[in-house]
Image (spheres, rainbow, N blue to C red):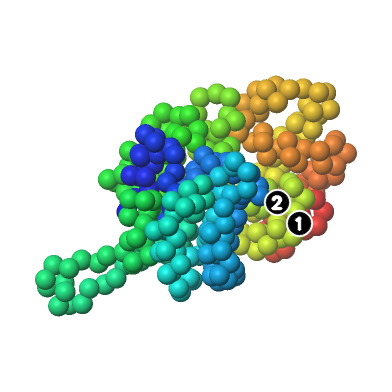
Amino acid sequence: MATFSVWITGVKKNPEPRQITWVCGPEIVLVEEVVNHVSEFLAPEPWNRVSLVAGEDSERSIWAALDQHPMDTSPRLVVVRHVEKIHEWDRFVQWVKDRSRNPRTYVVMVSSEATVPKTEPTPEERRHGTRPEPLPHIACIGTKGHVVECKPFTSATALRSVEWVRSKAPMRDGIARHLLTRSNWDLRLVRDTCLKLAVFPGEITISVINAMMAEQPRDSFTDALLALDRKTALLAAETIPRDEIGRIIGLLDAKLDKAGMIHDMQSDHRSPGDMAKALGPQAFLLTELIKVSKHYDAKRRLSIRKTLAVADEAYRSGQTTGLLEVVVAFW
């Protein structure tokens, strides 16, 4: 059994996955990284990739999927989620024993449990030094596969956390630590931020991180509205504190300006490099803006700015109830 930090260290030395991977833990981002690594390394053809969900798919269909051999030369990958809902494990234990008969079928068992489930010794057994042991269907994996617990990074694994961040986007160690701290160690937020930073043309600095983090609490509303997803924007608006409305109006105005600039540059057939350069320190927004800029020609931008001006005036006069909903309606 290994922590994510131990697992990722081993992967750097030998990236080839073992035939069986069992992964669990509260850090869903890290759990998905384990699953994605196995999938990307094996690169099975679509007909050799099977995704099942215990509790929705029958246990019989899960074990049947493991027994099936791959089609053609591609390996076969079976990913089973919510495996904590499986009750009968005898077929799996037998499959582990007989796995050499089907060496090109790989399985990833994803559990929603926080830790690897173990048998708890009785008080008497504890007094004799007996320790908790993984349940038989996990213990049988042994050295034949990987059992990985994805828990939050700690001070003991701080170095691994910095390496993990830097693997997502190039930056200095101190900047990576600042990103982790600034995001309050929310690894999903860190990962999503790094995806934006990966397209950033200049050096990633603390000021760039701070600029991105300043937008995060309002992103779900502004991103949905820019994409013309009014339903999601309205749902997000319900959770926004009233004292945030003024800042959101300003953010919408700024993003509208950038979306308009990208729209105009696309019309002039300018390259993505030119667009990133024009965005400057906020070049990380390019991927997002390119997707929505087609909606924002000069005529529409003028209409939206009039709406934002009215909303801003209402906010300054103390009117906040329903204000964002009006912005969504007239966007």
Q: Please, which residue is most extreme toward the right here?
A: 299
Specify the quadrant of the image occupied by residue 269.
Answer: top right
- In front of the other: 145 or 186: 145
Label 1: element kind? helix
- In front of the other: 158 or 329: 158
The label shown at residue 281 is none
What type is the residue that disc 2 sits on?
Ala
Quadrant occupied by the N terminus: bottom left
The residue at the point 45 percent across, 29 percent down is 171
In the image, taking residue 167 as reference, residue 276 lies left or right, namely: right
Can residue 178 be seen at all in this image of the molecule?
no
Can residue 227 be seen at all in this image of the molecule?
yes
Q: Are marks 2 and 1 in contact (CB under 8 Å)?
A: yes
- Pinpoint residue 116: horizontal percent, then vertical percent: 36, 62
Q: Residues within 10 Å of mark 1 (few under 14, many from 20)?
A: some
Specify the quadrant of the image occupied by residue 260.
Answer: top right
What type is the residue that disc 1 sits on?
Arg
Give the labeled residue for mark 1. 230
Distance from the alpha carbon under mark 2 to that under mark 1 = 7 Å
In the image, taking residue 196 as reference, residue 317 lies left or right, namely: right
- Pinpoint residue 2: horizontal percent, then vertical percent: 33, 50
Give the labeled residue for mark 2. 224
The residue at the point 58 percent across, 67 percent down is 61
Label 2: element kind? helix
Residue 68 lies, with reference to residue 265, above or below; the image says below
Work out whether mark 2 precedes mark 1 in sequence or the reverse, and give the earlier one: 2
Q: Residues within 10 Å of mark 2 (few under 14, many from 20)?
A: some
